[in-house]
Amino acid sequence: MKDLEKILEYQKVDIDLRRIYDKIEKSDDYKKMELAKAEFNNDRKAGIHCEEQAQLLVSTQEEFAAQRAALTEELERLILIVENNEDDEAIEGNIEQLEDIRKRLFDFEKKVNETQNKMEGVVNNYKEANEAGRKHKQAYMTAKNKIEKLKEENNDKIEELTKKLSDMEREIDPSAMEIYRSVTAEGKYPAFVEAYHNTEDDMYSCRGCGIALSQKRKSELLEDGACRCETCRRIIYKN
């Protein structure tokens, strides 16, 4: 493979840089920061859900209020009719209507009270979500500040290695760099590994995943000096 030695040197520097980032990203404070961030987002979603529930309950209460007002008006109208009517039959019919309206108003009161209780529950949940969100945000900021400090402590080394990689990259064949990036993008370090040769059975395997090469890949390795692992997709080279 073209520029194999250069890409191997590049890989060494890149792995050194990756170790620094791993030190940061695998620290307890980084885990705390990510956890607090996820919990804060959950709290925010819970708050939004409470707001949506509250809007629905307010709409329901407004509907109940309008229906109750209409029934109350009808109740008052019928009371006047009963009070001013001397026809016993008509009075009896109006009284039945009055009882029906009173029953419906009673049912409305129950529904209104239930809705009010739900609203109080939603308000409490909203307050709890906001309070939890405040605490998780604080935890996030505390952890983030510690991570920023850790980054700052390693900043000089990160800049040094990053510049070195940039300088080295200009000397490497673009196609080799493209292959390197495609493998490391999958989180596979190292991307280029030396072939392991078992002299007893003359078999070659990948040092990245440990799987033996097929006869086709073995032929490529021996003829071209490098091949791609069919299992982990790393580049296997032979010295």
Image (cartoon, grey):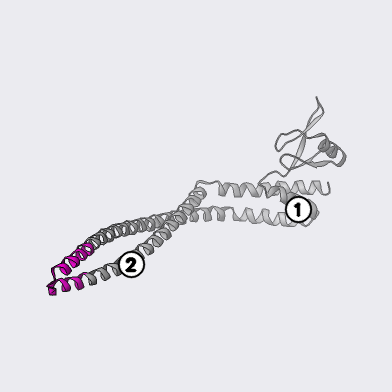
Instruction: Judge from the rendering whether residue 135 lies leftward or rightward of residue 147; answer left or right.
Output: left
The label shown at residue 124 is: none
Q: Amino acid at mark 2?
A: Glu
User: Is residue 44 among the parts visible in the rendering?
Assistant: yes
**Is 144 in front, or is 150?**
144
Residue occupying the point 63% across, 54% down: 158
| On screen, residue 4 above or below 213 | below
Q: Position of residue 88 (x, y in %)?
A: 13, 68
The magenta segment: 75-102
Q: How many marks?
A: 2
- Say whether disc 2 or disc 1 marks the residue closer to the N-terminus: 2
SS state under label 2? helix
Judging by the rendered image, the residue that carries numbered circle 2 is 63
Amino acid at pointer 1? Glu
Where residue 116 sits: x, y (%)?
Answer: 29, 60
**Quarter of the view holding residue 173:** bottom right
Which secondary structure, mark 1?
helix
Say whether residue 99 is magenta: yes
Gap in angstroms between the C-alphas marked 2 and 1:
64 Å
**Image position of 65 with respect to 200: above or below:** below
Indicate the quadrant where residue 83 lies: bottom left
Quadrant position of the C terminus in the picture: top right
